[in-house]
Image: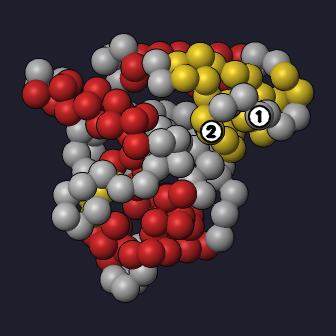
Amino acid sequence: MYYYIYESLIGPLCLVEEDQKLIECSFGTNGKGVLKETEFLKGVIKELQEYFNHQRTSFTIPINPSGTHFQKKVWQALTTIPYGETRTYKEIAIQAGNEKACRAVGMANHNNPIAIIVPCHRVIGTSGKMVGYAGGLDKKETLLNLENNDKKRGK
């Protein structure tokens, strides 16, 4: 297991690789394993840089998030939210197979180990308000603004 700290537009991101798959992209500098910028992690950084530079709207990085069956269903549903769009917790709950699991979707979002690439920042409250984000609402707002501005420009 290897990790590397990438200084992104929204602060440091800790990227963790295991068996040529990304298992974590989290806010901060607490890594697991050996600190090393592997070729795989260089590829992750390249895709993240392209995203932040308005050159990428989806990711091709192999991922392997660790979680419960329900969490994985939620995280899979998150990856279907198109760039520059949002969904409500209820819409994700329905997609994950349990309309009444809005709070559980919120907890799955909170526990998402692969921020940005598994785009939990695209989930909003039913009222349309930004609610909750493990990295802080300021980061969520920055990410949504980045995507929305691109969408307005036709990217």
Residue in the picture at 69% in, 22% down: 5
Q: Please, is residue 19 above or below residue 41 in the view?
A: below
User: Residue 42: where, in percent of width, then height?
Assistant: 65, 16
Name the residue beneath numbered marker 1. Answer: 30
How far, Cα to Cα, is label 1 from label 2? Answer: 9 Å
Q: Residues within 10 Å of mark 1 (few under 14, many from 20)?
A: some
Question: Colour scheme used in the picture?
Answer: secondary structure
Screen quadrant of the C terminus: top left
Q: Amino acid at mark 2?
A: Ser
User: Residue 131: where, in percent of width, then height?
Assistant: 36, 56
Residue in the picture at 20% in, 33% down: 148
What element does badge 1 sit on?
A: loop
Screen quadrant of the N terminus: top right
Name the residue beneath numbered marker 2. Answer: 26
Q: Amino acid at mark 1?
A: Asn
Residue 41 quadrant? top right
User: Residue 10: where, in percent of width, then height?
Assistant: 48, 24
Proximity of marks 1 and 2: CB atoms separated by less than 8 Å: yes
Residue in the picture at 60% in, 58% down: 111
